[in-house]
Amino acid sequence: MTETLLIFILVGFLAQLVDGALGMAFGVISSTILLSLGVPPAAASASVHLVESFTTGASGLSHLYHRNIDWSLFRRLALPGIAGGVIGAYLLSNIDGSIAKPFILAYLTIIGLVLIYRAFRAPPVPRNPRIVAPLGLAGGFLDAVGGGGWGPVVTSNLLIQGSSPRTTIGTVNATEFFLTVAVSATFLFSLGFSAFTQAAIGLLIGGVAAAPFGAVVAKRIPAKPLLILVGAVLTATSIYGIVRALT
């Protein structure tokens, strides 16, 4: 086993541990590393989504076991998310979608700061989110175009609307499985197997190994610190992405 493969296994493990616990970051972390190594955006996104087809499946089953899934929210998210992901994957296969990336990251930075502010200002009061289908459509599209974004966009906005952190994270993770399968199939149809990089093997091994642990963390951490963690991870990764996009 080469040193490079071991690095990708470690990256996959850590990224999925964060993603399973906070409902975001696997795609963002993995895509950032692949892009920094010179992998083209379409190939990076294709590889990450191929890996996520397995990691989100394992993570979704774990959240199902721990009863972290809100099935009403799941039904409202799934189809719009899949539609947005297919459209985004098709466009990225044919055009350069990186132009809008700094603006998307700036928006996510603001959302992260708002989440942290709300967590400290007052205890989160769970309530049913009203804007779900358009959010799923946008999240799926941005996830495919940016190589990651379903969790940051969807989880953060649902939390802003007052959705329960534990069930939001579990539901978003479970829904993501169907999104990533659809996006991977679209990339495969548009680009062929050449789009999937060797790094996907390492990310897959590490990601699947970490998937069962994230649901346990999400179940046991109280709402307020969980909200702070989500906001902090979202803000940090978004600011890092902005710096990379502008340099």
Image (spheres, grey):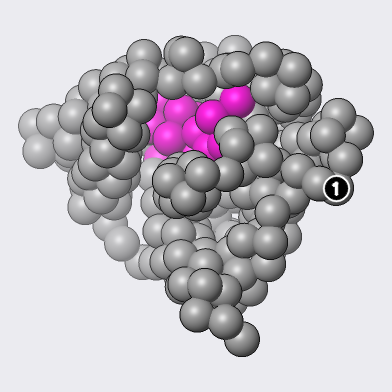
Where is residue 162 drawn, in percent x and y? Answer: 36, 29
Asked if residue 202 is positioned above or below residue 102 in the image, the reply reads below
168 to the left or right of 56? left
Rendering quarter of residue 59: bottom right
Residue range of the region highlighted in magenta in the rendering: 145-164
Name the residue at 46% across, 13% down: 100
User: Does dot 1 land on a helix, a strand or a loop?
Assistant: helix
Where is residue 25 drawn, in percent x and y? Answer: 44, 47
The secondary structure making up most of the magenta span is: helix
Quarter of the image containing the C terminus? top left
Where is residue 120 drawn, in percent x and y? Answer: 10, 38
Question: Which residue extends farthest front?
Answer: 38
Residue 163 can be seen in this image: no
Viewer-proximal residue among 76 and 34: 34
Question: Which residue extends farthest left?
Answer: 121
Three-letter amino acid code at the position of disc 1? Phe
| Residue 153 lies in the magenta-colored region | yes
Asked if residue 84 is positioned above or below residue 217 in the image, the reply reads above
Name the residue at 68% across, 61% down: 198
Viewer-proximal residue among 107 and 214: 107
Question: Which residue extends farthest bottom?
Answer: 1
